[in-house]
Image (cartoon, grey):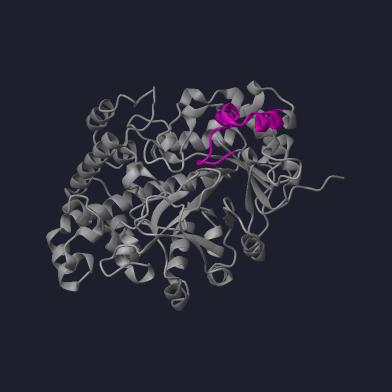
Amino acid sequence: MIYPRRSGVLLHPTSLPGRFGIGDLGPAADRWIDTLVRARQRLWQVLPLGPTGFGDSPYQCFSALAGNPYLVSPERLADDGLLEAAELEAAARDHPSGGAHDGRIDFGPVIESKLALLDRAFARFRDGHGALAGAFERFCREHAAWLDDFALFMALKRDQGGRPWTDWDAGLARREPDALAAARERLALHVESQRFQQFLFFRQWGAVRQRANANGIQIIGDVPIFVAHDSADVWSHRELFLLDDAGRPTVVAGVPPDYFSTTGQLWGNPLYRWDMHVRSGYAWWIDRLRATFRMVDIVRLDHFRGFAGYWEVPAGLPTAEHGRWVTGPGAGFFSAVFAAMPEAPIIAEDLGEITPDVFVLRDQFDLPGMKILQFGFGTGATNPFLPHNFPKHCIAYTGTHDNETARGWLASAPEHERAHALRYLQCDAAAFPWALIRAAEASVAHTAIVPLQDVLEQGDEGRMNLPGRPGGNWGWRFRDEDIADWRLERLAEMAELYGRADDVPLGEEPPAAS
C-alpha cells in the first residue's frame, strides 16, 4: 500500500470539551474536525472505541466489537427528539467539570448520569418519539452476529450487580441454552436497551467519521491484541481462550520489566488458544478487523510483537516479572488477514522488548512501524528512534498515550538524556515541545502523529495513561480556549513546509524535487 506523506493528531474522543463531564460525539467532535482542517492535518488517531469496564481503560472493554455508550452525545439525542432541552440542562448542571471550564473526567458520576440519559432516551423511543424505528431494526439485523450476545451479556451483568461472568449462575456462565433462553425472556427490555445504546453510538460515530472523511481526514483506530476476560467476547467464545473448566484464565498476558515498569506490566487478559483460531482460518479475528475497518480508515495493531511471541504469566501472580515467552501465530495469521482483506492498511505497534523475529514479521507484510522520539536520547547517534535514523516507511510520534508529554518527559528525564535532547534539537527547555514536533514533522517518515497535549505544551497534568498504575488514567480533557489560533497556524505551516499538507491527494506521493 502507498502511504502519502501526511500528519495528524492523537486525541481520544473522551478528551473533547463539552458540558456533560466527558467528551462525546456531538458538537465538540464537529469542532475538532474543523480544527484539524484549519491545521491542515489529514489524520486523526483515536484509542479503542469500545465500552470501557473496570479502570475505565479503552484497552479493557466489555466487547471488541461494540461501541462506548458514554461517548453518545446528549445534544444529538435531543436533535433526534429523544431528550428535551430541560433534561440536557439538568444533566450538565450535575457536572461541575462541565461547561466552559472542563476538568478531568470523574468517571463514576459521568457513567451514572450518561446511563440515566440513555435510559430516558430509550423510554422515549419506545413511546414512539423520534423517527428511528426503521434504522434501529436494520442495525439490529445487520449486527446480530455480535450484537445479540453482547446485549444479553450486558443485561446479565446489570442483573448480576456487575459481577464477572465467571461468578454468575453456572448455567449462564456455561451458556446452557435453557438458561440463556430464560434470561432473554426475563431481561428482554434490558437486552433491547443495550441494542439501542449500540445503535445510538454507531449512528453518531458514523456521522463523525463521514464528516472527517468529507473534509479529507482519515481516522486511525486501535485494535488491542488481547481482549478483557470479563467481556462478551470471552463469555461467548470460551473455546478460543486458555481457560479452566470454570472459565477463569490459566495464564494471562503482560510484558516483562521494561522502560515503563521495573516489575513489568500485568495486563491480566486471557491468552488465545491459537490452535483453535488456526482451525477456523482465524475467522474470529478477521470478523473483528472487518468490524473495526467499518469504523475507521486505518488500524494500529497494538502490541504487534505478540503475534511473533508474547509474554505468558501464570494466573494469580502479583506482577509480570515471572513468565515466559511463547511463540505467536506469526505469518500464518497475517497471511489469512490479507487474503481476506488484501488492501487493509495496518500499522504495527512494534515497541517494547523487540527481538529480530518481530521486525522480520513486520517487514514480511510491509507494515509501517512506530518511532517514538522520546526514546531517542538515551544512547548515541545510532539510536533507531532518532530522526536521522528513521526509515521512510514508518510513523513518527513525539509520544503516545502511554508516554509522558514532551514537556513532562523533559522535566523528568535523566540529565544526560535531557542534555542530549536539547543539543540534538538545538533548543532550550522552553522551546522543547515544538522542537520535538518539528523533528517529527521534518523527518523522512511518511506519517507524523503528535498528541494534542504536545501541541498545547502541557506537562504531567496532560498525561493520558501511566502503564501499571491501577487508577487515575484516561481522564484528561482539553478546553476549546486551549487551542489558540497560533498553535493551529504553526501546525499548518509545518504541514505545508514539510510536504504533509492537504494538497497532496490521498494515495499519491508528493512530487519529486526537481
Q: Quadrant of the N terminus?
A: bottom right
Q: Residue at x 32, y 46 (%)?
A: 54
Left or right of 347 in this view: 202: left
Residue 412 falls within the magenta-colored stretch: yes
- Residue 265 in view, yes or no: yes
Give the percent coordinates (x, y) of residue 199.
Answer: 32, 53
Residue at the extreme bottom? 279
Give the percent coordinates (x, y) of residue 465.
Answer: 46, 39
- Residue 492 in view, yes or no: no
Q: Please report the bounds of the magenta region as a residue range.
A: 399-422
Give the percent coordinates (x, y) of residue 408.
Answer: 55, 29
Q: Residue at x 52, y 67 (%)?
A: 328
Residue at the extreme front? 322
460 or 256: nearer the eye? 256
Give the percent coordinates (x, y) of residue 90.
Answer: 23, 28
Residue 406 falls within the magenta-colored stretch: yes
Q: Quadrant of the C terminus?
A: top right
Image mark count? 0
Q: Residue at x 61, y 61 (%)?
A: 358
Rendered image quadrant of residue 116: top left
Residue at the extreme right? 514
Left or right of 437 in this view: 322: left
429 or 448: nearer the eye? 429
Q: Which secondary structure type mostly characterizes the magenta part of the structure?
A: helix
120 or 132: nearer the eye? 120
154 or 270: nearer the eye? 270
